[in-house]
Image: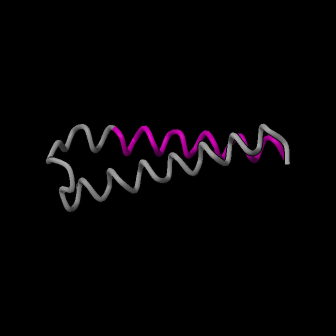
Amino acid sequence: MELNKILTYSAIGVAGLVMLVFLLDLTVGIFHRHIAMDVLFILGGAFLLWQGIETILELR
């Protein structure tokens, strides 16, 4: 497997994990109730996930 694909899949995994953690924090309040920070991290993770998927489609 090429290094580009490995790095892209890793970034997709990290973005999914970040989105999951902060979505759980937004709903359950695991860390603290900072709604603005949770929403911004979810949006950042979604943007990184979208960019990773676009990159994988371009590397085909």
Q: Residue at x 84, y 42 (%)?
A: 2
Q: Residue 10: x percent and y percent?
A: 63, 46
Q: Residue at x 60, y 42 (%)?
A: 11
Horizontal placement of 34 versus 57: left or right? Answer: left
Q: Height in image: 23 above or below 49?
A: below
Q: Residue at x 57, y 51 (%)?
A: 13
Q: Residue 37: x percent and y percent?
A: 25, 38
Along the line of sight, the residue nearer the viewer: 52 or 3: 3
Q: Residue 19: x percent and y percent?
A: 41, 51
Say if the magenta span includes residue 58: yes
Horizontal placement of 38 versus 29: left or right? Answer: right
What colour scheme governs how the chains and residues are painted in the rendered image of this protein?
Answer: one colour
Q: Height in image: 23 above or below 44?
A: below
Q: Residue at x 36, y 54 (%)?
A: 21
User: What type of secondary structure mainly makes up the magenta span?
Assistant: helix
Q: Which residues are magenta?
A: 41-60
Q: Residue 58: x percent and y percent?
A: 78, 41
Q: Height in image: 53 above or below 30?
A: above
Horizontal placement of 42 versus 25: left or right? Answer: right
Q: Quadrant of residue 24?
A: bottom left
Along the line of sight, the residue nearer the viewer: 60 or 31: 31
Name the outermost residue toward the left: 33
Total marks shown come to: 0
Along the line of sight, the residue nearer the viewer: 33 or 44: 33
